[in-house]
Amino acid sequence: MSQQLGGQPIIILRQGTTRNRGQEAQNSNIAAAKAVANAVRSTLGPKGMDKMLIDGMGDVVITNDGATILQQMDIEHPAAKMMVEIAKTQDVEVGDGTTSAVIIAGELLKNAEELLESHIHPTVIAEGYQQAAVKSLEILSGIAITVKPGDHEMLKKIAETAISGKGAEAYKVLLCDLVVQAITKVTDPDGTVDIRHVNVQKKVGGAIEDTMLVEGMVIDKERAHPGMPKEVKNAKVLLLNAALEYKKTEVSAKINISQPEQVQAFLDEDEQMVHAIADKVVRTGANVVFCQKGIDDVAQHYLAKAGIFAVRRVKKSDMENLSRATGATVMNSIDAVTAADLGAAGLVEEKKLSGDEMIFVSKCKNPRAVSLIIRGGSEHVVDELDRAIHDALMVTSVVVQDKKIVAGGGAPEIEISFQLHRYASTLGGRIQLAIEAFAKALEVIPRALAENAGLDSIDMIVAIRAAHESGKKTFGLDVYEGIPVDMLKAGVVEPLRVKTQAVTSAAEAAVMILRIDDVIASSQSGTPGGMPHGGMGGMPPGMGDE
């Protein structure tokens, strides 16, 4: 980039900097964003396919989870990275609908490209998209259905829709039952749910149907000392955030020893101190101790002699969940413990699971933290099952909190599209074209569902649209039968928040990419030099074009 001044060029940007402007920059960004959307499009829906991702170390991930696919792909193009952000946000906020959000954003940009070619200004398209997004949220809240958090059958259907299409589909009845039980247990009286209180442990070995829910905590640890009991019934649980060992002095002190006997006396005194600490633990009446810090060898010996089951170096998150499960208070000092601070569990035992020792704290009276142990024949199966269960836990917790659902199977997208077309016709000017482009873009979801199921997408869209025009708002695509059906009756339902978040984040990303008319890439930033061609890290340049 340079300016002429009296025949002398003035260099403004560093040498090696690339710059794309106007239509060229927009085409490059849109092509990259479309390439990302196309990369995950085939994974959408119950008939979606999986992707195998291999990283630089040779580690393999097999998944059809949109967020996981995009995080694992080595994406370099800056506009493409914005699409990855959509998937991340969707995953954090709702846990499901990551693929949908990215596909909608890609389609919004594809339709915007056609408008740009018709010489409609990007800011007009951006304004139209923003208006359409606001109107879409209104339409969604109008078609949302209220559910009671105690409606377990509906919650199971919500979890089932999230698991459909993942590798665990054959076992979805068992898994959805476990997910709903887990969420019901950890829901606080005020209706809030934090899925961190569902402690998910992955164990390779056994079959998927061996996956189980433990009403309490399972910790990947073993007893501090082999002399301790292997199981304790009617456990009184003490949770300690303090080390059971001799405290060293803060200041550096020097001890002068002149006689050999003094060495032994010094060591005896040390042992006496640890013995006194162990005695304090025994006097609390606890027979199970979980310690967040270390337990001295001498302390282990005394606790084992007293028949106390002790575990050391337990993670902070596990301590918090143990507190919720057993009702114990996490104590910072052994001196302050009273009987009221101890928790209760019907059974605490050390068991072998797939060759590893694990601590089971079960049969808790009213556990507000539970554990899900995921089993499967191989590491890849267990990992994909973990992702499916995470999605199911998230969507179920969202419905318990929001109490709002919508039909699935592309029904809400067609309904929004249908109502947006009517809304656009009431407006004049070029903004109407942008809103119609937004409405058309939303049809990409049922279209992708149909394509992935091997159906004719045009016939399916026409049939679903006809159902919606006759007032059947909950009709969507049955990918197994290839006909429009009432998704509520079919049990295909999703949280309202999945749809609102997907539409909002897709519209925001599309608008942000559209408003860029100048891309200035420093030679040191590592961005690909071939950006004008829409090429993306690890992808051929033409991948964004349909």
Image (cartoon, helix red, strand yellow):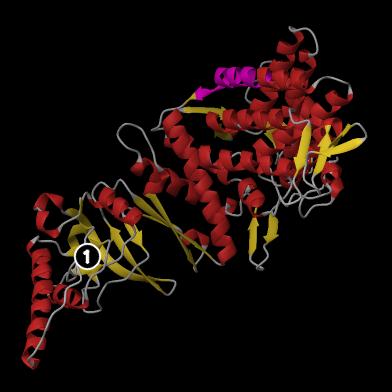
Q: Along the line of sight, which residue is nearer the eye, 501 or 162?
A: 501
Q: Is residue 90 magenta?
A: no
316 with respect to 520 (left or right): left
The residue stretch that appears in magenta: 132-145
Total marks placed:
1
What residue do we see at 73% from left, 23% from top?
A: 438
Residue 462 at x, y percent in the picture: 79, 25
Residue 340 at x, y percent in the picture: 12, 49
Residue under numbered circle 1: 243
What quarter of the picture does the C terminus occupy? top right
What residue do we see at 13% from left, 73% from top?
A: 274
Which residue extends farthest bottom? 260
Characterize the local packing of mark 1: few (<14), some (14-19) or many (20 or more) Cα atoms within 10 angstroms.
some
Rendering quarter of residue 81: top right
Rendering quarter of residue 493: top right
141 with respect to 222 (left or right): right
Rendering quarter of residue 475: top right
Is residue 1 visible in the rendered image? The answer is no
246 with respect to 449 (left or right): left
Is residue 202 visible in the rendered image? The answer is yes
For the stretch drawn in magenta, the main secondary structure is helix
Secondary structure found at label 1: loop
Which residue extends farthest right? 7
What quarter of the picture does the N terminus occupy? top right
Q: Is residue 91 above or below residue 111?
A: below
Residue 139 at x, y percent in the picture: 61, 18
Q: Along the line of sight, which residue is nearer the eye, 294 or 282?
A: 294
Q: Is residue 140 magenta?
A: yes
Residue 539 at x, y percent in the picture: 80, 52
Tell me the kind of residue under disc 1. Ala
